[in-house]
Image: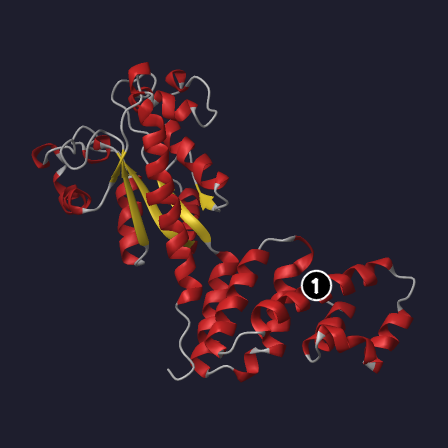
């Protein structure tokens, strides 16, 4: 990082208000006096150091220092001009050396996860026995339209899943939403595997079609994704789109035999069911559904994400 590395080292070992008295800093500023890029970098490093002082430096315990350092780092992940990397390097030089070994390890692991992680992986099916349109779009017509998606009735794709992805992104989450598995190719499998590895929460939109015996030789991506999420001990949120859960869940005798364990898991899970909004008389259910999604889905993902910086080991652990 060149000169910016020198700036980080200077700001890391001093309070931001004292940097102007540092001879190395003064010399660096004089040598780069006409360099606008240098001064932009200096302002960026100083802003992050001051924020760390205000949010991390004031904490009375090392545990809280780690917590607030992780929170700030997460805010900066994906920002321009390497702000997340600047934050990480100043934190490591300013505060990290005094933390316990367990706190250091937790910070290392969690900051790496926050750097690469997606908030959610959205699993859903495109299965449709009708051959035209997609019945799920009709059942949730007005809810889908309430998110600005036009004429979902003419689409063969799962526009309810599309709507959920928009809803989550509008709530400032980053996620994986893969509209079509065009081929059971190695490239698709790799993308799914990597995204599942990197997600914090596995969200599955449940439809009875996912368990049906009518798709004998077809690959069941949803089942595969579920098994991977279980194997990776992912936090899970299930949404049920075919009526009331569990009353309207497909009966066990209609389920493809090798999907029985998955079906039972879903049957016993705390699913968020979504009321139909097909006709105008059901329009009141739009807000009911949106409130459910806010309370159960958005706040659920926030809770699991928050747990990453709330789980810092204590100073005496």
Q: Residue 258 in the image: state x and y as whole percent.
A: 15, 43
Provide the residue designation for mark 1.
47
Q: What quarter of the picture does the C terminus occupy? A: bottom left
Q: How many discs mark residues in the rendered view?
A: 1
How packed mark 1 is, by other alpha carbons closer than 10 Å (few <14, some 14-19, many 20 or more), is some
Q: Is residue 127 left or right of residue 79?
A: left
- Quadrant where the N terminus is found in the figure: bottom right
Q: Residue at x 35, y 39 (%)?
A: 293
Q: Quadrant of residue 7?
A: bottom right
In the picture, measured across the screen, residue 89 lies left or right of residue 273, that is right
Q: Is residue 148 left or right of residue 126?
A: right
- Residue at the (62%, 64%) spot, across then down: 85
Q: Is residue 212 above or below residue 202?
A: above
Q: Secondary structure at mark 1?
A: helix
Whether residue 24 is visible to the viewer of this picture, yes or no, is yes
Work out which residue is located at the far left of the displayed protein and give it. 253
When asked about the image quadrant of residue 298, the answer is: top left
* Residue 304 spot, x, y in % from top left: 37, 56
Q: Nearer the viewer, residue 115 or 73?
A: 73
User: Residue 129 or 67: which is nearer the viewer?
Assistant: 67
Q: In the rendered view, how is the structure colored?
A: secondary structure
The picture places residue 218, in percent across and down from the top left corner, at 26, 33
For the point 35% across and 21% down, which residue is it?
141
Q: Could you tell me if residue 180 is visible in this image?
A: no
Q: Residue at x 25, y 22 (%)?
A: 129
Q: 162 and 211: which one is in front? A: 162
Residue 263 on image: x %, y %: 17, 42
């Amino acid at each position: 990082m060149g000169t910016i590395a020198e700036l980080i080292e200077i700001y890391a070992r001093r309070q931001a208000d004292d940097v102007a008295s540092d001879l190395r800093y003064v010399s660096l500023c004089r040598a780069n006096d006409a360099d606008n890029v240098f001064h932009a970098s200096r302002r960026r490093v100083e802003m992050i150091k001051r924020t760390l002082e205000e949010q991390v430096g004031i904490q009375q315990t090392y545990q809280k220092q780690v917590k607030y350092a992780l929170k700030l780092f997460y805010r900066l992940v994906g920002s321009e001009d390497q702000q997340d990397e600047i934050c990480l390097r100043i934190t490591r030089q300013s505060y990290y050396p005094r933390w316990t070994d367990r706190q250091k390890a937790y910070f290392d692991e969690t900051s790496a996860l926050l750097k690469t992680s997606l908030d959610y992986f959205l699993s859903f099916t495109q299965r449709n026995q009708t051959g035209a349109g997609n019945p799920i779009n009709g059942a949730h017509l007005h809810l889908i339209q309430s998110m600005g998606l036009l004429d979902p009735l003419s689409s063969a794709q799962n526009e309810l899943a599309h709507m959920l992805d928009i809803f989550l992104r509008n709530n400032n989450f980053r996620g994986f939403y893969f509209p079509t598995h065009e081929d059971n190719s190695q490239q698709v499998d790799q993308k799914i595997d990597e995204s599942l590895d990197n997600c914090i929460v596995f969200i599955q939109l449940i439809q009875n079609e996912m368990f049906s015996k009518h798709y004998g030789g077809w690959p069941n991506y949803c089942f595969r994704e579920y098994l991977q999420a279980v194997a990776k001990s992912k936090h899970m949120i299930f949404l049920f789109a075919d009526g009331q859960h569990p009353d309207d869940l497909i009966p066990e005798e209609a389920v493809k035999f090798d999907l029985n364990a998955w079906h039972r898991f879903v049957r016993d899970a705390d699913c968020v069911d979504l009321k139909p909004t097909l006709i105008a008389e059901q329009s009141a259910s739009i807000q009911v559904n949106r409130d459910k999604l806010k309370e159960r889905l958005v706040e659920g993902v926030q809770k699991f994400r928050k747990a990453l910086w709330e789980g810092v080991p204590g100073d005496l652990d």
